[in-house]
Amino acid sequence: MKRRHFVGLSLLFVASCSTTVNQSNRTSSNLAVSEPETLEFAVTDVQGAEDLQQNYQTFRTVLGEVLEKKIELFPVDNYIAAAVALQSDQLKLALTGPSEYVIMRARTNAVPIIAITRPDYHSIILVRANSEIKSPAQLKGKTIAMWKIGATGGHLGPIKILLDAGLNPQSDFKISMLERKGLQALKQDQVDALAIGVNRYKDLLKTDGLSTNDFRIIATGQPLPSDLFVASSNLPNTLVEKIRDRLVENQDQLIEAILVGKDNDKYQGAKLVPANDSDYNMIREVYKAIGQGNLF
């Protein structure tokens, strides 16, 4: 599972964000804080200023109009950099995935503002069409290709499926993180199964020129938690509430602006819905199951 790499990131994150702000302290400490004129905005799965500009410039403009604030795009390399920036008050707002959110929440007390749904967002496990494997339980002792460490649809979601099938992710199967190479690896009999988000599977079928007839889905996971907008715990409560209200009131306009981005098809048909922290307990459960409970 490339565990040493994952643990290394975890330790770096713990060192960078060594304290967690208590929610009650936040409530009492920032009531008198004035509203900032500029809100820095990051997207944790977009690396580099150029890609952030291409995908979120239109959204930045519309968000600024909706909030009546200056919005500055804040490029980050990963969610760890975003979390450190949130804690140090360099970053005010971020759009992040479920996996990243639970760690950022634990280490920085990032405040969930609103969730943005991703239609048809669930994980699947598939095998070759001629495979004798019929169920997830039969993957014990097998090698499973997944996307990358910490990916909600391509790692944590599949682990949840396997957990529910009675398998131990630390001992019962081998994981090979292959990202886009996973489907071809399965086709060429290099792995026994592929666990992936359903939309990524559909994309790979097109780009790799493969057919659904080549594969058979043996398990489909439950809908995964939504992506969400989070705020720095240093922002005043009144501003967070105002941001939430205005995002909801203008959601059609904002989602239309997100869809202008070339890589944002995942939000086609999206809606803004309440962000309940308990909706992300499944992610926490899986992190603990793979031996990363220290993140919380």
Image: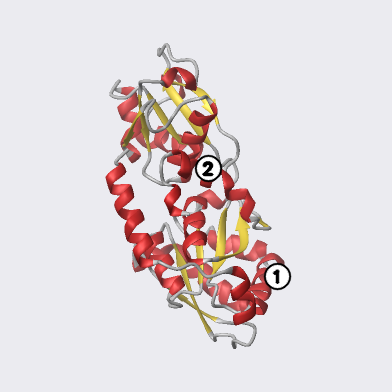
- Residue at (48% x, 50% y) in the render: 99
**Number of numbered discs visible in the structure rendering:** 2
Residue 131 coordinates in the image, percent (x, y): 40, 14
Left or right: where does residue 171 sit relative to residue 235? left
Work out whether 67 lies above or below 168. Answer: below
Bin the neighbour count of mark 1 within 10 Å (Cα to Cα): few under 14, some 14-19, many 20 and up.
Answer: some
Residue type, numbered disc 2: Glu
Q: Is residue 17 left or right of residue 282?
A: left
Say which of 85 and 47 sits in front: 85
In the image, residue 62 above or below residue 157: below
Residue found at x 35% / y 22%: 142
Q: Residue at x 53, y 66 (%)?
A: 110
- For disc 2, the marked residue is 285
- Residue 263 seen in this snapshot: no
Look at the image and tell me in which quarter the N terminus lies: top left
Q: Position of residue 179 (x, y in %)?
A: 34, 40
- Choose the circle earlier in sequence order: 2 or 1: 1
Disc number placed over residue 127 in the picture, else none: none
Q: Is residue 71 above or below residue 272?
A: below
User: How busy is the neighbourhood of tag 2: few (under 14 within 10 Å), some, or many (20 plus)?
Assistant: some
Task: Provide residue 213's location: percent of width, then percent of height.
Answer: 45, 19
Q: Position of residue 94 (x, y in %)?
A: 50, 66
> Quarter of the image holding residue 229?
bottom right
The amino acid sitting under disc 1 is Asp
Q: Which secondary structure, mark 2?
A: helix
Q: CA distance from mark 2 to mark 1?
A: 31 Å
State the SS at label 1. Answer: helix
| Mark 1, residue position | 245
Q: Residue 26 or 197: which is nearer the viewer?
A: 26
